[in-house]
Image (cartoon, helix red, strand yellow):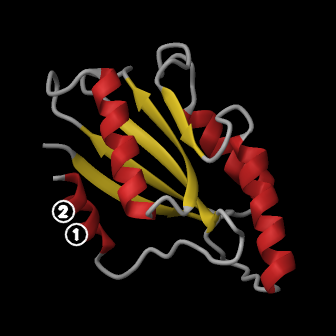
Amino acid sequence: MATTRLMPLHIGKGRTVSTAIADVIDYVENPQKTDNGKLITGYACNTRTADAEFLLSKRQYFQQTGRRRGDDVIAYHLRQAFKPGEVTPELANEIERELAMKLTKGNNAFVVCTHIDKHHIHNHIIINSVNLDCTRKFRNFWNSSFAIRRIND
């Protein structure tokens, strides 16, 4: 049974929204960890330009709603780890994609990357905090870790 963890991503000191998103997506899409990019899938975005697409949706969100906070969540990083030998990399990627679809209800773009560089297979998913029509944001609700665990199991 896989373990999960959902982490909100913030800009951080000395960085812009653009560099913060690009840094995390570059890390999870590392070709050395994802079998030269074969274990990367996306939903409602192109995996090669996801950072620019996420940034554009944030700009559209601000233009449409006028809402902006200094400590705003720019994306969510969901990590899912399996026991060694529990799943194949391809199955792990499909499981994570299904988990992300159920969690976001198909309302947010995301990128799923399966890493095979450790003794255990693990997934990283970056979920855009802004929904597809740029009018709302995904919210990490209280005790969401329990809901994610229930969906995952």
Q: Which mark is residue 10?
A: none
Q: Which residue is mark 1?
A: 146
Residue positioned 38% across, 37% down in the render: 123
Residue 97 vertical placement versus 131 (above, below): above
| Amino acid tagged 1 | Phe
Identify the secondary structure beneath mark 1.
helix
Asked if disc 2 and disc 1 are in contact, CB closer than 8 Å, the reply is yes
Q: Residue at 72%, 70% (x, y): give it.
A: 134
Label 2 packing within 10 angstroms: few (<14), some (14-19), many (20+): few
Q: Quadrant of the N terminus?
A: top left
Residue at horizontal 62%, vertical 47%?
A: 44
Look at label 2 and name its amino acid. Answer: Arg
Name the residue located 66 percent from the left edge and 75 percent from the top edge: 72
Front residue of 139 and 118: 139
Q: Quadrant of residue 105?
A: bottom left
Q: Is residue 16 among the parts visible in the rendering?
A: no
Q: Circle 2 is placed at which residue position?
A: 150
Residue 46 in the figure: left or right of residue 35? right
Q: Quadrant of residue 15?
A: bottom right
